[in-house]
Amino acid sequence: MGKENCLLLVHMSDIHCGPRFERDILLQAIDEISDLGPDVIVITGDLTENGLFNEFQEAKRYIQLLKCKHLLIGSGNHDSRTTGYRLFPSFFGEPSSAREFEDVVLIGLNSSRPDQDGGEVGYRQRLWMKECLDKYADRTKIVTLHHHLLPVPDTGMEKNIISDAGDVLWSLISHGADLVLCGHRHRPWVWNMGKMNIFYAGTVSTNRLRGFYQNSYNIIEIKNSGIQASLKIVGGKEFTLNPKTIKTLKIAEQPVTECIL
């Protein structure tokens, strides 16, 4: 990457077109993201609620409104419901793919499985991922998938982390991945594992929020000097993406109306 080059990436997740979809919030997010003029937009799955044909149609209509030349769209566990895994490629292409952008490579993994909330990368896909990481050893390597690799605070008992998380984590670290992007838990978070960062996106447009957290997406800048990330509340402020600031981003800071019965 040239001295002054910078790749701007927006990471959004968990749109959930369906019964609990917040249309106006997604439209606001689309306007904000398009105004940023990102080089790449990554959507890490759960575009739909139940993997239904009409939900995929709706998700496609909104995603087409994003003003960005390069999109990498992954599949989530909700997209694989009701045989939705058969529909996904027709609307958004294969969920496993590798894309090159200047000195950055994006490797998209499909961790979703039919009618299962949990996920798995699998032996063959992990081999393919390692080959990609080795092939692009001289580039910044970003791996994307829907499910999380490590538990996320404030999300209760861990039930659906990917079943082969240990093997996937070791493959990522030993083959030099720089960044991993996940969604799934509707909760923004970040873990640092040596030189590798794992960024979790919250949900951008469903009202199935965790606790007091709000709809959001991540903004990531990749430069020679490293990777800088921020969390953007839809219709609200932008904050540095780190555990300390995430813990303060609560709707409870706003006045609570007292209810007298």
Image (tube, rainbow, N blue to C red):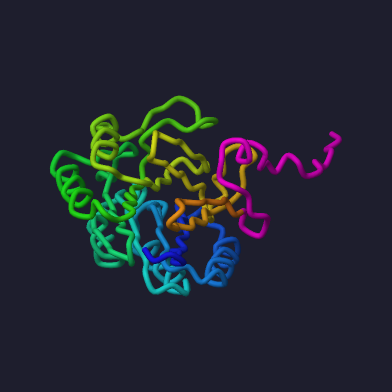
Give, as a single range, the part of the protein colored magenta: 233-261
When the figure is inspected, residue 28 is found, relative to residue 188, above or below; the finding is: below
Q: Image point 44% across, 57% down: which residue?
A: 222
Residue 23 as seen in the image, left or right of residue 198:
right
Label the magenta part by its dominant secondary structure: loop
Q: Position of residue 85 (x, y in %)?
A: 25, 54
Verify whether residue 58 appears in magenta. Answer: no
Residue at the farthest top position: 157
Quarter of the rendering occupied by the N terminus? bottom left
Q: Position of residue 105 (x, y in %)?
A: 30, 58
* Quarter-of-image position of residue 72: bottom left
Q: Image point 56% across, 44% down: which residue?
A: 209
Residue 94 as seen in the image, left or right of residue 223:
left
Q: Position of residue 241 (x, y in %)?
A: 56, 45
Quarter of the rendering occupied by the C terminus? top right
Q: Position of residue 197 (x, y in %)?
A: 42, 41
Q: Is residue 84 visible?
A: no
Q: Nearer the viewer, residue 260 or 107?
A: 107
When the figure is inspected, residue 209 is found, relative to residue 223, above or below; the finding is: above
Q: Image point 52% across, 56% down: which residue?
A: 219
Q: Nearer the viewer, residue 195 or 244?
A: 195
When the figure is inspected, residue 195 is found, relative to residue 65, above or below; the finding is: above
